Image (spheres, helix red, strand yellow):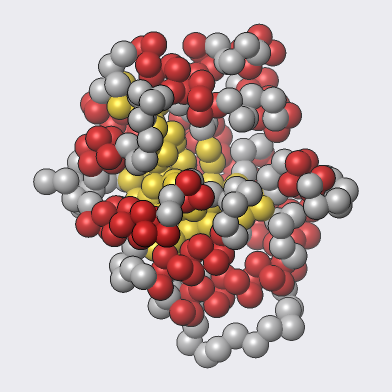
């Protein structure tokens, strides 16, 4: 792939595990490799919008996205205000990824878990409606991409967002997502990947990536819809589930699997680069460099 034809725009990054200087060096290196977007995960460490502002203030070209900022963490006006501010101060380099997350996001804040589709619809409707904010003239609105897997949430994205994000889904789900989303909205597919031809190492990396999602009901419902059973997400995940949700292999295998999502209707790809060796820490530069849009 070259810079002109690469479908890979972004890299999903758990920035909480990097020091401030490491995060900036990482962003600058991604920028030099031709990646156009840095996606930040919303975990339980740094505040995601503050972190995005820090990266944007210390870079010049790369866009920074919240991936995803969950809606139980902030009300709709606070989210809109954050996005407008970051977009203005970075000259339009901020992307807002939002999602309902999972019941733990509500319970840790002491609030009830509401119907996720209706909660999200009301939240985006508030952001898109009349709000008591005073935007500055000429400031471009940050695009809003909604994390969505099921058809009901994807329909909310089609109605109220600029597009949708999916995560750890096979190409068949990308085809289904595009059908619900329609032809005119962006569909960003986030794919965790590992560069290794060793099936044992590749699947072990896949199980590490899947481990926090295996007990989550939202993912289990999607897997059931895709023909999996409880046995597939028990005991660390079956080989079939891992191979369905996680990309591992040599660079040609990974590239071909990424291309399958583009052929299925994805607008762009963001990768999550994983190490094959669990003893290694830091960014998986072997894969990031091999897939880089500007690698040669």
Query: How far across and down, in percent of the image, does residue 56 sit?
Result: 41, 69
View extreme (bottom): residue:
137
Residue 248 in view of the camera: no
- Examine the image and state in which quarter residue 47 appears: bottom right
Query: How far across and down, in percent of the image, does residue 188 sit?
Result: 47, 47
Q: Residue at x 80, y 52 (%)?
A: 109
Residue 280, compared with residue 186, is above or below; it is above
**Image position of 136 (left or right of 266):** right
Residue 59, compared with residue 181, is above or below; it is below
**Image position of 188 (left or right of 228):** left
View extreme (left): residue:
296
Residue 191, compared with residue 50, is above or below; it is above
Front residue of 62 and 17? 17
Front residue of 70 and 161? 70
Which image quarter holds the N terminus? Answer: top left
Q: Residue at x 60, y 85 (%)?
A: 135
How many tags in the picture? 0
**Image position of 120 (left or right of 179):** right
Query: How far across and down, in percent of the image, does residue 210 sit?
Result: 55, 26
Residue 107 in view of the camera: yes
Query: How far across and down, in percent of the image, does residue 270 sit?
Result: 41, 45
- Examine the image and state in which quarter residue 93 appears: bottom left
Q: Residue at x 48, y 69 (%)?
A: 53
- Examine the image and state in which quarter residue 96 appears: bottom right
**Image position of 250 (left or right of 109):** left
Q: Residue at x 69, y 13 (%)?
A: 230
């Amino acid at each position: 792939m070259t810079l002109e034809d690469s479908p890979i725009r972004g890299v999903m990054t758990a920035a909480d595990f990097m020091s401030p200087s490491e995060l900036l060096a990482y962003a600058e290196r991604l920028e030099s490799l031709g990646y156009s977007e840095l996606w930040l995960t919303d975990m339980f460490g740094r505040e995601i919008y503050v972190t995005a502002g820090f990266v944007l203030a210390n870079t010049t070209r790369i866009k920074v996205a919240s991936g995803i900022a969950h809606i139980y963490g902030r009300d709709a006006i606070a989210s809109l205000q954050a996005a407008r501010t970051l977009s203005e101060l970075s000259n339009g380099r901020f992307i807002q990824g939002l999602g309902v997350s999972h019941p733990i996001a509500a319970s840790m804040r002491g609030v009830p878990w509401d119907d996720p589709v209706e909660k999200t619809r009301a939240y985006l409707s508030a952001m898109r409606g009349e709000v008591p904010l005073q935007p500055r003239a000429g400031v471009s609105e940050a695009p809003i991409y909604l994390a969505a897997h099921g058809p009901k949430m994807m329909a909310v994205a089609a109605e109220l967002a600029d597009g949708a994000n999916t995560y750890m889904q096979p190409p068949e789900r990308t085809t289904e997502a595009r059908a619900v989303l329609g032809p005119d909205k962006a569909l960003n597919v986030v794919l965790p990947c590992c560069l290794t031809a060793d099936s044992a190492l590749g699947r072990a990396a896949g199980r590490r990536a899947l481990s926090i999602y295996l007990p989550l009901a939202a993912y289990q419902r999607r897997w059931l819809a895709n023909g999996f059973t409880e046995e597939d997400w028990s005991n660390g995940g079956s080989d079939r589930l891992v191979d369905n949700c996680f990309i591992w292999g040599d660079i040609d295998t990974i590239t071909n699997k990424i291309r399958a999502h583009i052929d299925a209707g994805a607008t762009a790809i963001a990768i999550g680069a994983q190490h094959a060796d669990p003893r290694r820490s830091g960014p998986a530069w072997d894969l990031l460099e091999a897939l880089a849009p500007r690698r040669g």
